Amino acid sequence: MAWVTLSPSGGPGLPEGSPEHRYEICLTLDPHGQPSADAWLADGEPWPARRYWPGEGLIEGDVQYDPDLGWALRFFQRPDRAIDAPLHAMIRGNVRWRPGENVTIAEPDGQENAWRVVNVA
C-alpha cells in the first residue's frame, strides 16, 4: 500500500493551490498506477484517509469503493460514528496516481476541483 498526498491544483479561491489543504489517502495501486478495486474488495480492513484543512486540523476517514459509483472518501466527525459517516467526496479520473498527475474530487455540494498528486510513498 502507498500513502498518496493530494494538494489543490488551483482554482476558485486557491489559484496557486495550497499545501495547507491536502488529502492523504492510503491505497493499493495496480500495475497501471491506479487504485486497485480488487485489492480493496479483498482487504478486510478499511483503507485510511486523512484530510487537513487550515483551521480544522486533521480529520480521519477512510477510502470507499463501489463498483457502480467508483472511489470515494468519507470523514468521521466523531470516531464512534464511523459506520454512519456519509461519503464526503467522489474521486474521478482515470490517470496514473504519480506525482504531477491530477485527479478530480467532487465535493458533497457538487463542486469539482482538480487535486495534484504531490507524493506517493
Image: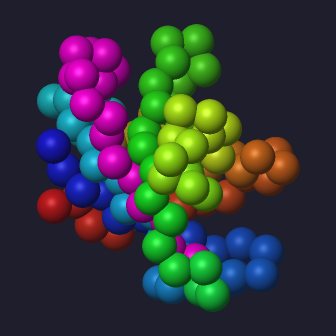
Is residue 10 shown left or right of residue 25? Answer: right
In the rendered view, would you say 87 is above or below 40?
below
The residue located at (46%, 25%) in the rendering is 65
Q: Is residue 2 above or below residue 64?
A: below
Task: Count the labels in the image.
Answer: 0
On-image quarter of the N terminus: top left
State the image quarter where residue 72 is shown. top right
33 and 86: which one is in front? 86
Residue interval drawn in magenta: 37-53
Quadrant holding the C terminus? bottom left
Q: Residue at x 29, y 24 (%)?
A: 40
Specify how the rendered protein is coloured.
Answer: rainbow
Q: Is residue 86 visible?
A: yes
Residue 119, given in percent of the width and then of the height, sits at 27, 67
Q: Position of residue 52 (x, y in %)?
A: 50, 73
In this rendered view, identify the residue nearer to me: 56 or 114: 56
Residue sticking out furthest to the right: 109
Where residue 29 appears, x then y in whole percent?
A: 22, 36
Residue ID at (46%, 31%): 64
For the residue pair 112 and 38, the one nearer the viewer reads as: 38
Q: Position of residue 116 (x, y in %)?
A: 46, 64
Corner quadrant of residue 18: bottom right
- Does residue 103 show up? no
Q: Residue at x 56, y 43 (%)?
A: 81
Which residue is most to the front?
A: 80
Q: Is residue 81 magenta?
A: no
Does residue 39 show up magenta in the picture?
A: yes
Left or right placement of residue 94 versus residue 42 in this view? right
